Amino acid sequence: MTEPAAARTPDTPDTPPTPGAWGVHPGPYAPPPPRPLARRLLVPLGTLAGVAAAFAYVGTVDPNEPGHYPVCPLLRFTGLYCPGCGGLRSAHAFVHGDLGAALGSNALAVAGYGVFALVMVLWLIRAVRGVPMRLAISPFWWWGFGAILALFSVVRNLPFGSALAP
């Protein structure tokens, strides 16, 4: 009598089957083999480098001087501030260390910088540990974020919310 195909190995019969030998494979739910640290850090550090380059550009080219950046289409055609209006001025002030001016230009953008920093730290820690980064955000939180953006847009365009206008 012969052994089943899954139990045969190229080694002696006393050794456990090795993955990939004689039809034995880890299956679709087996964890992937660990990648080298440099490869795991490639995407988060690349993302961080791209954002740092964008902040460096905005820090160098002043958005307070006309002609460097396009005007917000909503502001241009309706005179209303969108949630992003003042974001470039906020980033410029943030790069130069003027937190008061950054908050005055777009407080929601400054909050976004903080959220981005927290997510980047989490992503880098998980990459070093070899744990994949997955952000599963429920629709409740997406709707909540949309409501915050809408409320921020409405309030900054009303007379009592002029402190939020850029």
Image: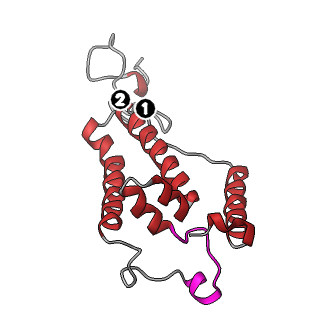
Q: How many marks?
A: 2
Query: Relative to residue 159, is residue 163 depicted above or below?
Result: above
Q: Is residue 21 above or below residue 149?
A: above
Whether residue 84 appears in magenta in the rendering, the answer is yes
Task: State which quadrant residue 8 falls in.
Answer: top left
Q: Which mark is residue 26?
A: 1
- Is 151 in front, or is 21? 151
Quadrant location of the N terminus in the rendered image: top left
Residue at horizontal 38 percent and vertical 30 percent from the top: 129
Tag shown at residue 152: none
Q: Position of residue 141 (x, y in %)?
A: 69, 50
Q: Which quadrant of the figure contains the C terminus?
A: bottom right
Residue 28 among those drawn in magenta: no
Above or below: residue 6 compared with residue 101: above
Quadrant of the image occupied by residue 148: bottom right
Where does label 2 land, which residue? Answer: 19
- Please state which of residues 112 and 38 is positioned toward the viewer in this rendering: 112
Amino acid at the residue labelled 2: Pro
Q: Nearer the viewer, residue 153 or 29?
A: 153
- Name which residue lies at 35% across and 57% down: 96
Magenta segment boundaries in residue numbering: 73-86
Q: Is residue 22 placed above or below 84 in the rendered structure?
A: above
Which residue occupies 50% across, 47% down?
114
